[in-house]
Amino acid sequence: MQERGIPIEIKNLVGGEEIQFEVKAAHSQPVRSSWFFILFGAVWTAFSMIFVVAFLGPLFLGQEVHFESNGVPTTASPDNLDPIILPAIIIGIFVLLGVFMMAWGIASMFVKGGYFIGTPTRLISYNNGKIRSIDWEQFSGDIEVNGTQEKGNLSLRMRTGNMVSRKNAPSQYVPEVIHLIGIAQVYSIERICRMRIKENDPTPPQMPENV
């Protein structure tokens, strides 16, 4: 399973190891992740625009805006914008957050994936000049694969990760995932990865208890 155009830097790193597969990923992240940020950003922006129309719309039409600030009735007008500057800044930040999420989601759809090489002992990746070598024992064996043999997606979950804080809930451990998106021969590569992860599993086998 060889891929043309594998950079010489990653091949030099392999040295004399046997190369069991070489592949280039079409994208760096699953497309569904990009769509999530696009849709979430669009909903966030649309919700924020309600406040833009309610608070700033009348000003653009030359009308006054009446609201309460710290329980005190306040009026802003095109000739007196000071009372509404702080609310406008806060609303603007919310709008920009939504736009940023949409922009990030759209941009991530066009980020190309890197090159991957599998050997009997490790998975090596190369993307934008950055080389990473991961021993198979670092993977948990939790693998997700979908698509067709000609073009599919492969996600390999690792044993390492990060604790993520959650609102009104205990922190949650989120393992790191290596994505190979839009690769050829995905099911053949999945079988190799699963075999190598199992062979290099650092967890000792469980012996059956005597009855």
Image (cartoon, rainbow, N blue to C red):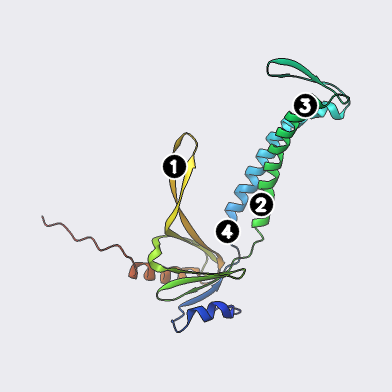
**Element class at badge 1:** strand
Q: Is residue 10 above or below residue 210?
A: below
Q: Earlier in the sequence, mark 1 or mark 3?
A: 3
Return the residue at label 3. Answer: 84
**Left/right of residue 46 with respect to residue 169 in the rendered view:** right
Q: Quadrant of the C terminus?
A: bottom left
Q: Earlier in the sequence, mark 2 or mark 1?
A: 2
Return the residue at label 4. Answer: 29
**Element class at badge 3:** helix
- The part of the image, by quadrant, that contains residue 112 is bottom right
Return the residue at label 2. Answer: 104
The residues tagged by marks 3 and 4 sit, at their Cα atoms, a distance apart of 41 Å
Residue 75's x, y, as percent? Answer: 80, 19
Furthest residue to the top? 72
Q: Are marks 1 and 4 in contact (CB under 8 Å)?
A: no
Return the residue at label 1. Answer: 171
Q: Earlier in the sequence, mark 1 or mark 4?
A: 4
Residue 1 visible from this viewpoint: no
Residue 58's x, y, as percent? Answer: 83, 26
Residue at (38% x, 61% y) in the render: 141
Q: Are marks 2 and 1 in contact (CB under 8 Å)?
A: no
Residue 79 visible from this viewpoint: yes
The residues tagged by marks 2 and 4 sit, at their Cα atoms, a distance apart of 12 Å
Residue at (66% x, 52% y) in the render: 104
Residue type marked 4? Gln
**Element class at badge 4:** loop
Q: Earlier in the sequence, mark 2 or mark 4?
A: 4
